[in-house]
Amino acid sequence: METEPEIVFHGIDHSPAIEARVRDRIARLERYLGRLVSFRAVIDAPHHHHRKGRHYAVRLEARAPAMVFAIDRAPGDVNAHEDVFVAIRDAFDAMERRVKTWQDTHTGRPAAHATPLQGRIAELDPARDFGQIALTDGRLVYFHRNSVLNGDIAELEIGDPVELALDQGDSPKGPHASTVRRIGTQRFVDALR
């Protein structure tokens, strides 16, 4: 880390045990995230007049070269946050989840590009704006009028060869196409010769 971590106590006396736990979790986060520019942790005991004990709130801010991650773990109705170490654990666990989510979407992983599938129109109902495509592996894939590219569903005919991309979302009715494109007057071949 480029600067010394800042650990602030509000409404609670400084505790070497709490500071040691926070520093351990910062080190773990730094191994997980990589280089940290700065880190700030605020341990707060905001409610002094609780009937059943004090609830702790933990606020974390980690600055990395590409991003700032902030977590605010207010006690809410979680009675487990009457223990400061549990509140610290929950806040750092939330920070690690946020970092992992960010890394999954923003790191240098190459995007998975699906190769388009090919098939032919097996069923067509332009009046109800849908149809089905028979793929080369025998599956039937539903498509809607809105998924047809470069034209209208009325321009398609049964037996037309098409190229399609499957929608990644799950559907209770089975696979459905997100895009459908007619691929010309090529002859569709069901089997190798």
Image (spheres, grey):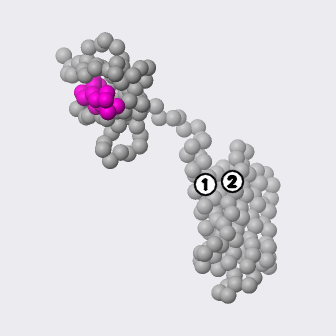
Name the disc covering residue 69, or none. 2
Q: Is residue 61 visible?
A: yes
Against 124, residue 70 (above or below) is below
* Lateral position of residue 191 relative to residue 12, left or right: left
In which quadrant of the rendered view does residue 171 lie? top left
- Which residue does the image show at 58% across and 52% down from the upper left? 100
Badge 1 crowding class, 10 Å Cα cut-off, few under 14, some 14 to 19, many 20 or more, is some
* Residue closest to the far front: 127
Q: Quadrant of residue 61?
A: bottom right
Judge by depth and name the residue closer to the eye, 151 or 118: 151
- Tell me which residue sits at (25%, 34%) in the image: 139
Instruction: Name, please, the residue furthest toward the bottom.
Output: 51
Is residue 128 covered in magenta?
Answer: yes
In the image, residue 91 sits, relative to residue 148, either above or below, namely: below
Quarter placement of the C terminus: top left
The numbered disc on residue 22 is none
Instruction: For label 2, count other residues whose C-alpha is less than 10 Å away and answer few (under 14), some (14-19) or many (20+).
Output: some
Q: Looking at the rendering, which quadrant does residue 27 occupy?
A: bottom right
Q: Between residues 42 and 177, which one lies in front from this camera angle?
A: 177
Amino acid under label 1?
Arg
Identify the residue at image location x=30%, y=13%.
Answer: 186
Asked whether 119 or 14 is in front, the reply is: 119
Q: Are marks 2 and 1 in contact (CB under 8 Å)?
A: yes
Percent x, y for residue 95? 63, 59
Q: Which residues are magenta?
A: 119-132
The amino acid type found where label 2 is placed reads Phe
- Indicate left or right for 183 with 56 as reference: left
Does residue 21 appear to the left or right of 156 in the view shown? right
Instruction: Return the residue at label 1.
Output: 98
